[in-house]
């Protein structure tokens, strides 16, 4: 997947592919990330890309020219891919969005600063995405969060030992709890079933804990699911065991 991020802070965005899974994705050849400096498209002698808002008021607005020229240059580089603007007014990012976007051949991601872009940039944008109902000072962290999450779904980025399929939200549930050595730590033992070597029992226990964790922490997610008979029974067991 080819990703172009349009930003006033290209060095900041480039950090993303120096660490962890995004870095592995680049090394595996399944991801390229180019951080394109919007300032390079300024026609101003002092490389300005913002100006005062018409109508008055505080803050500065990103001029439409440099931004749309940067979008055009990004399209010339990687093809006519979807253009996403990071924005608090966008659709909140979910795992469903992440999986869908991971299937795209490429993405152009636009990061705002100041009060955001001049509204006349919007016809060049296919989708606005938000990190959540709060306001960041720039779109970079939101873009990096999105690209990190997408990179987990690119083939070859995650090893076999780590599967994105088992992660929280993938099947509508939160993940089950995880344990590693030592078997007893500060008097707390690892649940016995995990030491049993019985894969069927382990899978049943994990599903039960995933259902239970979702019921406890994110009941709103459970309400969206039609639980099968087995799932409903496992959840009843989990609740009974709490008492
Ligand atoms: N005046 C704007 C906010 C501008 S914040 C408003 O209230 O809608 C500056 C930039 O930060 C935005 O253009 C956007 O790119 C980014 N940003 C801020 N909050 C964000 C969020 N929750 N999700 C994604 N991007 C965000």
Image (cartoon, rainbow, N blue to C red):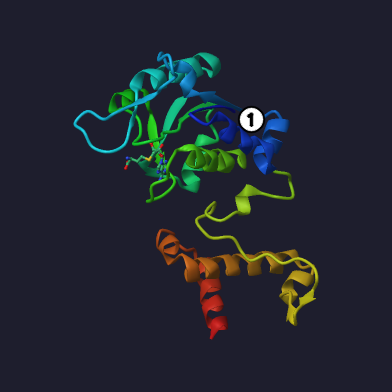
Q: Secondary structure at mark 1?
A: loop
The location of residue 7, given as percent across then percent down, is: 49, 29
Residue plotted at (44% across, 39% down): 138
Left or right of 150 on screen, residue 87: left
Query: Which image quadrant is residue 93 in?
Result: top left
Q: Which image quarter is the N terminus in?
A: top right
Total numbered badges shown on the rendered structure = 1
Query: Which image quadrant is residue 242 in?
Result: bottom right
Res. 109 visible in picture: yes
Q: Which residue is mark 1?
A: 31
The location of residue 200, given as percent across then percent down, is: 71, 65
Res. 155 visible in picture: no
Residue plotted at (60% across, 65% down): 207
The location of residue 4, given as percent across then percent down, is: 53, 26
The location of residue 83, given as percent across then percent down, is: 43, 27
Residue plotted at (74% across, 78% down): 189
């Amino acid at each position: 997947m080819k990703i172009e991020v349009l930003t006033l802070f290209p060095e900041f965005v480039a950090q993303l592919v120096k660490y962890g899974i995004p870095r592995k994705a680049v090394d595996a050849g399944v991801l390229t990330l180019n951080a394109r400096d919007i300032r390079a498209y300024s026609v101003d002698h002092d490389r300005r890309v913002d100006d005062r808002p018409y109508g008055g008021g505080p803050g500065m607005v990103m001029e439409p020219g440099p931004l749309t020229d940067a979008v055009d240059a990004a399209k010339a580089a990687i093809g006519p891919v979807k253009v996403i603007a990071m924005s608090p007014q966008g659709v909140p990012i979910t795992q469903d969005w992440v999986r869908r976007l991971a299937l795209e051949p490429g993405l152009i991601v636009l990061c705002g600063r100041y009060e955001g872009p001049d509204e006349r940039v919007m016809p060049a944008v296919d989708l606005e995405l938000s990190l959540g109902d709060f306001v960041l000072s720039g779109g970079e962290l939101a873009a990096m969060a999105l690209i990190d999450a997408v990179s987990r779904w690119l083939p070859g980025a995650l090893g076999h030992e780590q599967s994105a399929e088992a992660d929280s939200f993938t099947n509508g549930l939160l993940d089950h709890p995880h344990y590693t050595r030592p078997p007893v730590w500060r008097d707390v033992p690892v649940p016995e079933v995990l030491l049993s070597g019985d894969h069927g029992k382990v899978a049943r226990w994990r599903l039960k804990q995933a259902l239970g964790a979702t019921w406890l922490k994110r009941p709103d997610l459970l309400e969206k699911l039609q639980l099968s008979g087995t799932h409903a029974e496992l959840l009843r067991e989990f609740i009974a065991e709490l008492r």
